[in-house]
Image: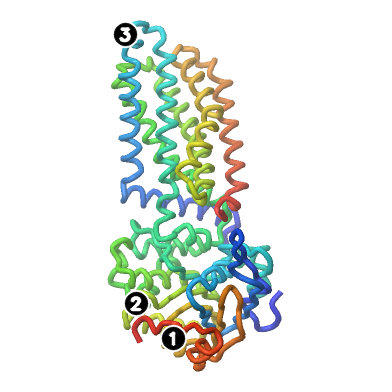
Amino acid sequence: MRSGGEWAEMRTLTLARKDLIVEFRSKQLASLMLLFSLVVILAFRFALEPMLGAESGSLPNLAAAVIWISYSFTAMMGMYASFQNERENDALDGLRLCPVEGGTVFLGKSLANLMVVFVVDVATLVLFIIFFNYDLGGHVVEMLLLTLLGSSTLVLIGTLVSGIAATAEASEIVLPVLFIPLVVFSVIIPAVNATRSILSNDVSGAFNQVAFIAGAAILFTALGYLTYDYLLEG
Amino acid sequence: MCEGGRVLEARSVSRRFGDREALRSVSLRVQEGEIVALLGPNGSGKTTLLRVLATLLEPTTGQVFLDDLDAFEDPVGTKAKLGMMGHRSFAYGHLTLLENLVYYGRMYSLGREEALTRGVDLLERVGLGHRSNDQARILSQGMMQRLSLARALMHDPSVLLLDEPFSNLDSTGCQIIGEILRERKERGNSILLVSHNLTRISALADRAEVLVGGVIGRSVPVDLVRSRLKEEYGCALEESGPR
């Protein structure tokens, strides 16, 4: 006999698996995010062209900002589609009819979103390295770990906000208006500082920033888990 | 708490949308093994009432009980006993028919094997066994309707709420759904259905409740539905759908 916690875990995985199968078959979200990330990286590449040649010492600063702004905008785009498959055939009502706590839905959606966003973010990092001809200088592992933490926090904030937007009238406006200010303070500023420290060979200098992002992840997990029931009621 | 034998009960349920009062102090009971038809003209509040009973919409005032559960005090416990067919199928277009049913079964705490077995059986029962590995997005409206009933039955609910279950169906589909509803009634399920198909309602329902302007009138025996509706409320329901 399964316990309540085991059922919740099973439902979380069932929901995440469903979202990933739908995404894998429709190929809507990941391909659009990849294309968007390519456009953003190229836009930065051409916009920053004069600075890249003039002063190579500023490159770690620019790199950190370009990477995290690209991650954030790409994640936001992914969040638009997070509830798209629930709108089809009113499946959100089907989900709301299930005897499932809102917190379980939040965790399941976050897990599926993270898998897609992390893959796209790694691809974004590769695109950045190619188009900016940038050498991570032996900090690949640290950058991947920071990307995983930052992506997780972006996704947790995005899933919470997209839950608010899912039942809102003007969801297209609600999402960026809430998402961008939250990620600027919770992810972009600390992650840019952490990235700059890592790329400047000062890995220990990134610890405080990493701890801040991890704290934000815990905070938004708790917020999403506790409020999703109310958010889905609309 | 519901009194003896009553399975689903709405007590003085009202629901407002801004200034508009969609439901006004509606009380309704559906007993064990009973099929009740909910009739009324378009915009009378039938779908709103069904959504309130399904816990999808909280009433402005009033209560809903399912057996001994207050639906809005214990929504999770209530939902486990409810099955609903809405206007749309709630199906994911990119999942196959069987995957849709297994997914919903798992969300209702069925084990993987049990969900799979039940999904296969239900698809056979609604006449979609041969399409079980097709993605739902390529189904016709009528087939979606059958899939929707199969989904609503996955967790073997004791109460069924059905919004226009015969719409978009051909005569075979209507017959299949009619047979399933009769079987469920014999097993003691309580069924509340909204339909404009008087022929089907006459053949299935034990009684009808008429909702006009958000207010429930008195119960009408199904064989008198047609004449009473015209006499008392001035509204005639369509004889729509296959007979």
Q: Is residue B192 above or below residue A164?
A: below
Among the two numbered marks 2 and 1 on one chain, the one whose residue lies closer to the N terminus: 2
Tell me the residue at 34%/41% (across/down).
A30
Q: Which residue is mark 2?
A: B169
The quarter in which the N terminus of chain B is drawn is bottom right
Quadrant housing the C terminus of chain B: bottom left
Whole-angstrom CA distance, mark 2 to mark 1, is 15 Å
- Numbered label attached to residue B231: none
> Amino acid type of disc 1?
Leu
Q: Position of residue B75 (x, y in %)?
A: 62, 63
Q: Is residue A115 above or below residue B169?
A: above
Q: Which residue is mark 1?
A: B198
How many C-alpha atoms fall within 10 Å of the one at disc 3: few (<14), some, or many (≥20)?
few
- The answer for which chain carries disc 1 is B
Q: Position of residue A122 (x, y in %)?
A: 37, 30
Say yes or no: labels 3 and 2 on the same chain.
Answer: no
Quadrant of residue B158 in the image? Answer: bottom right
Query: Which residue is found at the position 44% from the left and 49% from the top?
Result: A83
Q: Which residue is mark 3?
A: A53
